[in-house]
Structure formats: C-alpha cells, structure tokens
Amino acid sequence: MTRLYALLLCFLAAPAWAAWDLDQLMKALAGNRVSRATFVEKKYIAMLDSPVTSSGELLFTPPDRLERRTIKPRPESVVLEGGVMTMTRGQRQMVLNLGEYPAVGALTESIRGTLAGDRESLEKHYKLKLEGNEVRWSLVLVPREPRTRALVLEVRIDGERGEVRTVEIEQSDKDRSVMTITKAAAQ
C-alpha cells in the first residue's frame, strides 16, 4: 500500500513539474530588480586560431536599460536604453537609433528582452523554444526576420531559476560568441 501511495504522489506531482513553461520563466525573469553581474565573453572567429576573450560588467535596470562595460582587453561601454544604443570607446562615441537598424535591434532585444522577462518583445523577433526545467533551463531564440537571420542563426540562453547564466550567439557565418554571466554579490 505504501508503494501505491508513493506512486500516486509521484503521478499527482508530475503535472506541477511538467507545468514549467515559457510563462513561468518570463515571470521569474521579470521578477528581477536592478541586477549587476560580471561577464566573460569568448568570441570564436573562423579566421583566428584562438577565441578573443573580453570581460567586464553588466548592469540591467528594468524594463529596458542594459549597460555592458568591457574592462579587458580594452575599456568600452555599450548602453541600451529604449530604442537607442550608445557605444563609447575612449573619446569616441556612436549613437544608433535601433529603429533604423532592425537586425541589430532584434539581436540586442534577445538579451534585454530575456533579462526583462518580456515574452511579447521576444516573440516579436524570435521563435522561442524552452528546454529543461525550473532549476536548469535553456531558451533557444531563432530569428523570424530574414535580415536578422542573415546575421544570426540562433541565440541560446541558459539559466538557473530566474537567472541568466550564459548567452551563446551562433552567427550565420559560423562565428559564435559565448558569454558567461556571474551575478555580483549583493551590496
């Protein structure tokens, strides 16, 4: 009888585990407040023998401000706020209206939209596929628009619970980048 009871409990608990879906992931991600993290990114470029490595800090302020400060190999920053991307390296600064560059806007939205838990924005630009469970998940984003697909085959975002851990971008030219994200300790 005890075995039957245990089996029944497992059967009844299964729907709760199986219920992990995109809505639950987006809700978990959207629950994050201002977050600060460090990153290490490796870019694998076909014409180079070894990956190009950069590192720095990420600062995300919901709903739409993402700042990436690269420290190594050389200082630079990229700030996404609303529909504007500002890139600064040394004394030079470049400002892009993402509305004028839809493929770049879609690529930046893959990260920002995921961090914000903004399913609507993600689905506007990508076909979404969620794998895994609440403890460890992967979200695969495949671009909808031909202009974006000309640059990127897919974006794979791996995480644990409501935290993004890695972002892997596979480009159409077979180059790829893998960014590993480590949440900074609470201050």
Image (cartoon, grey):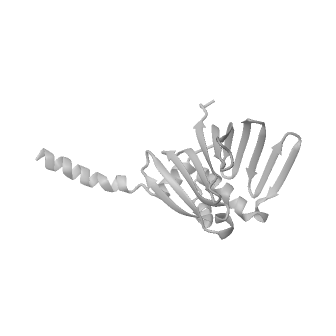
In the rendered image, residue 115, in percent from the top left (x then y), is placed at 60, 50
Left or right of 73? Residue 92 is: right
The answer to whether residue 91 shows anywhere in this view is yes
| Residue farthest to the right, as pictured | 91
The answer to whether residue 35 shows anywhere in this view is no
Depth check: give the residue in front, 10 or 40. Answer: 40
- Give the residue at x 25% y 54%: 11
| Residue farthest to the bottom, as pictured | 146
Q: Which quadrant of the figure has residue 51?
A: top right
In the rendered image, residue 34, in percent from the top left (x then y), is placed at 64, 42
Q: How many marks?
A: 0
In the rendered image, residue 36, in percent from the top left (x then y), is placed at 64, 38
Quadrant in which the C terminus appears: top right
- Give the residue at x 72% y 64%: 102
In the rendered image, residue 128, in percent from the top left (x then y), is placed at 53, 62
- Give the residue at x 63% y 60%: 172
Left or right of 182? Residue 22 is: left
Depth check: give the residue in front, 45 or 55. Answer: 45
| Residue farthest to the left, as pictured | 1
